[in-house]
Image (cartoon, grey):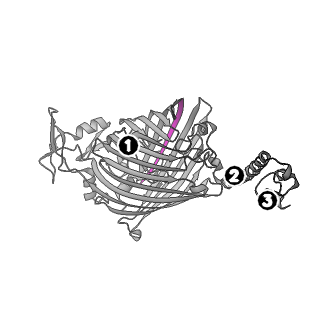
Amino acid sequence: MFTARLLQFLHVPLAAPCLLLPLKSPLKKHMSKKMLRTWLTASFGLLASGAFAQQVDSLSFIRSKRMSDDDLAKKREGRFVTGLPDLSSDPVTGVGFGVKTNIIWNGNRDNPLFAYTPYLMRLRANAAYYTSNARELTLSLDVPYYKGTRWRYRLDFKAQQNPANLYFGSSEATLGRLRLPSNPGVTFATYAEYDAARKALRPGQPGEAAEVTDALSNRFRETEVMLNLKADYALGKGKWRVMGGYEIQHLSYATFQGTKAEATLPVTGQQTTAPNGTALLRRDAQQGLIFGLDGGWVSIIQAALIHDTRDFEPDPTRGVYFEAANEFSSPVIGSQFSFNKLFFQGRAYRKLPVGKRTVLAGRVGVGNIFGKEAPFFEFQDQWSPDGSINALGGRQSLRGYRANRFLARSLAFANAELRIRLADVKLGKQNFGLGVAPFADAGTVRDRWQDLGFRDVRFSYGAGARIAWNLSTIIYADYGLSKEDRLFYFGIGQNF
């Protein structure tokens, strides 16, 4: 009776007691050593299978995240390193050189988490230098479902300096045509026309040299050191998670008035150099239109509610992702700024019955910044637990427009991609999936969230190539087009 109850507790079939003969049983003397070893192996095998079944049952909160059979067959076991020379290209920061590395711990196939998580642990270390003199070092540790529990822990560190940030204004007026900082009455239909015009030598205005150029008047330099700690907890069956985090960062800014820059003579078009005029960011700060140009310490408490049924986070084939994310900053928690940012994002992925791996992917995002004196730099990105999104313009939102091209307190955007796998190639122990991804983007900004709508929406479109390296590392090359610009991007990671 005791044996039967024990077997029931361990989820072992009741037919098994015939194998669990007492060691003093009369039958023992009729058993050879080989038979005894067989009996012990079978007995403990059943016990182990019962314990395994119980462990799998305890992981029911991630069952919806099971990878597809095709992707699971390609997933590598154990620990491995993916490292790439970081050759990237962005129309703002320029060509980048460096290294991107991932140390990934996947565990073995008999691990109950193997089919349900992208990895047991990932350590990412990236360092890059760009031709614009931008430089960046990032470290990131991600531990999903720590030791089979409902907790996920993340730690991120970043140190960067970027002298190529762009600023075109901080209101819905940026939806209009491009304007010269020194002469907003003159507009331009394309970025190429605008870029040529701002390099033209002009007479200096009050506070400027006698003759100046506006070649750098839309640029500013940002220097940042940031540390972020966050954890989330899976609720119920694991489709919902709550997250909390804390971030501290120090920021400093500089503009380039007085710096020698490119210039052209208005009549002959001859190339020369001249001091740069007053930057647009400086002009807006002097007029009280923006705050935060002096930089300082920013302390932030983060919170989010997340719904996630994606099957494989780095490159999903099915599922949805939704988040309501909030960042709160106040002198009460040691910050020099007061603001409250709210961002909603929804993503959906659906595998189509076309080809070997064709996925339709879509995203919608809506955000708003509360606080009359919210710093201008918070307008430039929307915080997401799954990775912040630079807005609005650039690789993460509108790929046919420059980064920060449209900036205001409220924004809305949408993206759609058709990710088509053309071939799978195996080189040694490395798996590579080759594909293409035509895309379309749309977005707009407003000074008040109540005014968000379908008026003055900006569109871009294009196509890209994708290489999936061992599933987890996605290499992209995108070419985006709009009425204003033509832009090329190259790097690592899916857009969403």
Q: Earlier in the sequence, mark 1 or mark 2?
A: 2
**Residue closest to the eye, 30 or 58:** 30
Residue at x 39% of width, y 37% of height: 489
Give the amino acid at mark 3: Leu
Separation (CA) of disc 3 from disc 1: 55 Å
Q: Mostly what secondary structure, the magenta segment?
A: strand
Separation (CA) of disc 1 from disc 2: 40 Å
- Residue 315 location (% of width, % of height): 53, 41
Give the amino acid at mark 2: Phe
Instruction: Classify 10 Å Cα crowding around label 1: few (below 14), some (14-19), many (20 and above).
Output: some
Q: Is residue 496 visible?
A: no
- Residue 323 location (% of width, % of height): 54, 53
**Residue closest to the eye, 128 or 334:** 128
Pointer 2 residue:
52
Q: Secondary structure at mark 2?
A: helix
For residue 276, side relative to residue 489 (left or right)? left
Q: Earlier in the sequence, mark 3 or mark 1?
A: 3
Residue 417 in the magenta stretch? The answer is yes
Q: Secondary structure at mark 1?
A: strand
Q: Quick check: 88 above or below 226?
A: above
Residue extending farthest to the bottom is 332
